[in-house]
Image (cartoon, grey):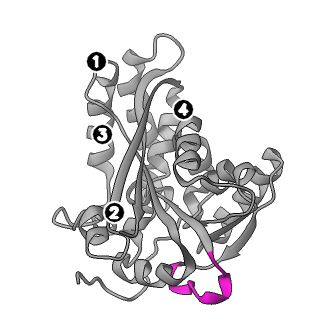
Amino acid sequence: MTSEPATPSFPRFQSTVPHYVAGRPNYAPALIQLVADHLRLTKHHRLMDLGCGPAWLGIAFAPRVGEVIGIDPEPAMLEAARTLATAAGVDIELIEGSSFDLTPQLGRFRAVAIGRAFHWMDRADTLRRLDPLIEEDGAVLLFNDVRPDVPQNAWYKRYSDVVDRFTNRSVGFAPERLRHETILLESRFSELTRIGVVEQRLVPVARLIDRALSMSTSSPEQLGALSGQFAQELATEMSPFAATGGVLEVIESQVLIAQRR
């Protein structure tokens, strides 16, 4: 079985929290409903939001299940999650911890949702730890988003070019890193289904700048005094695409549903 380093390597996201909440694109509500229907989620089920960040997934699924637990190693992210959960009127138990803290004491879950965080974990080890925690017909849910190659997304290359120029590659991942599907196919959760929902959104330039500053490789902590220059260059490059008050973005919210065969 594919192995990865079994030592924690979680980045510090404290400096990114306000930018993360303001700038990261949330997942399409229609996708959440499709997943709930696929897994036949009810109030009798429990769901874990692992590496929850501001707990967008936990908050989205909370009205559809009986209990949600969110786990994240960054206290500032958990505080943001508490604020957002309160604003949404949902109750979520939030725990400071990581994939290395997955123990039977957490109980059993119908599903474990992971949004843009699986790559920070020892993935094979995480799946082994999750195996006894997930019901036999339950699932691991890996959420992500992509931008289709359509004319509306012409701005994205200029945006990416600026981000790439400022990115600190030392905190990123090697290009040859195995895809999630490879790890999953060698695990107990080897039956894979991908679902996507495509939306068109109008995104203010300020929110795109927040999105860039929310990344571990281009966070205020990484950029330091260059943060202002970074934001200004992004604003300049995006200006031609923002004539209607924002940049038009076509985004596909995706989930990879991994279940046992």
Q: Which numbered tag is attached to residue 151?
A: 1
Q: Which residue carries the number 4 mark?
A: 206
Q: Which numbered tag is attached to residue 58?
A: none
Residue 153 x, y percent position in the rendering: 33, 25
Residue 116 x, y percent position in the rendering: 45, 57
Residues at badges 1 and 3 in contact (C-beta under 8 Å)?
no
Q: Which residue carries the number 2 mark?
A: 191
Residue type at mark 3 is: Ser
Measure how far apart labels 3 and 4 are at the Cα level.
15 Å
The mark nearer the N terminus, 4 or 2, is 2
The mark nearer the N terminus, 2 or 1, is 1
In this rendering, the label closer to the viewer, 4 or 1: 1
What residue sits 49% from the left and 79% below the top? Answer: 130
Residues at badges 4 and 1 in contact (C-beta under 8 Å)?
no
Please say whether residue 105 is one of the residues in the magenta stretch. Answer: yes
Measure how far apart labels 2 and 1 are at the Cα level.
34 Å
Instruction: Say if 145 sits above or below 185 in the image.
Output: above
Q: Which residue carries the number 3 mark?
A: 160
Q: Residues within 10 Å of mark 4 (few under 14, many from 20)?
A: some
* Residue sitting nearer the eye, 173 or 63: 63
What residue sits 67% from the left and 88% below the top? Answer: 105
Residue 100 x, y percent position in the rendering: 50, 85
* Residue sitting nearer the eye, 182 or 39: 39
Q: Secondary structure at mark 2?
A: strand
Q: Residues within 10 Å of mark 2 (few under 14, many from 20)?
A: some
In this rendering, the label closer to the viewer, 1 or 3: 1
What residue sits 28% from the left and 71% below the top? Answer: 183
The mark nearer the N terminus, 4 or 1, is 1
The mark nearer the N terminus, 3 or 4, is 3
Residue type at mark 2 is: Glu
**Range of residues picked out in magenta:** 98-108
